[in-house]
């Protein structure tokens, strides 16, 4: 799988370990930064990875900031992105299976790296349950996005 990864300054070490973990498992990783420990703005990296996912340059995205929140909020502003903050494997599994999420986010200041790897593994091993009620609900999410893009949310 081709995976785009992005982070802010809080997550440099964790990102490096996650990249190594992914590559050891045969995934191709595109690192969208940051690779500096200087304080930076997470919306920038959330948007870049969000765009890469939406444009299908990568199959899945992983985003890490202090909490996973800011960077996932940024990614979720990109049309077609469904980013979920997961701090344990159950939510990660459900986010893929029921919500067809395409970006996994977590917090370098919230979870340890071994738990993060476990969450990543579950995420990548879980497929969306095609068809039925979950597809309908994801289609409803897309419809909300469409209505707002057209400037009329009624
Ligand atoms: C940076 O200090 C911190 O605010 C950021 O990493 C993240 O937690 C934001 O949601």
Image (cartoon, helix red, strand yellow):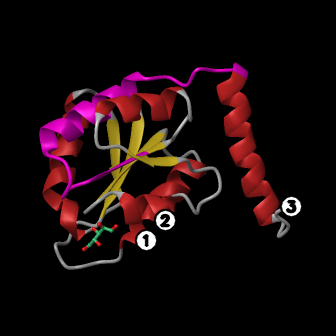
Q: Label 2 belongs to which residue?
A: 74
Q: Residue furthest front?
A: 154
Dot 3 beta carbon under 8 Å from ligand 1: no
Give the mark toward the camera: 3 or 2. 3
Q: Label 1 belongs to which residue?
A: 43
Residue 123 location (% of width, % of height) = 38, 31
Cα distance in 3D space between marks 1 and 3: 28 Å
Q: Say which quarter of the image contains residue 44.
A: bottom left
In the displayed structure, does residue 3 sit left or right of residue 112?
right
Give the mark toward the camera: 1 or 3. 3
Q: Quadrant of the C terminus?
A: bottom right
Q: Earlier in the sequence, mark 1 or mark 3?
A: 1
Helix, strand or loop for disc 1: helix
Residue 128 location (% of width, % of height) = 55, 25
Residue 110 part of the magenta segment: yes
In the displayed structure, does residue 117 sit left or right of residue 129?
left
Residue 33 location (% of width, % of height) = 31, 63
Q: Earlier in the sequence, mark 2 or mark 1?
A: 1
Cα distance in 3D space between marks 3 and 2: 24 Å
Quadrant location of ligand 1? bottom left
């Amino acid at each position: 799988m081709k995976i785009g990864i992005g982070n802010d300054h809080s997550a440099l070490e964790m990102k490096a370990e996650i990249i190594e973990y992914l590559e050891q498992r045969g995934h191709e990783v595109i690192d969208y930064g940051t690779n500096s420990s200087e304080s930076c703005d997470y919306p920038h990296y959330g948007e870049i990875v969000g765009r890469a996912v939406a444009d299908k340059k990568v199959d899945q995205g992983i985003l890490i900031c202090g909490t996973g929140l800011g960077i996932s909020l940024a990614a979720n502003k990109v049309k077609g992105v469904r980013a979920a903050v997961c701090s344990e494997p159950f939510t990660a599994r459900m986010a893929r299976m029921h919500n067809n999420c395409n970006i996994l986010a977590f917090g370098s200041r919230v979870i340890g790296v071994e738990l993060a790897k476990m969450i990543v593994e579950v995420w990548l091993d879980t497929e969306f349950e095609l068809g039925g009620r979950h597809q309908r609900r994801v289609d409803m999410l897309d419809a909300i996005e469409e209505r707002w893009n057209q400037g009329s949310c009624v």
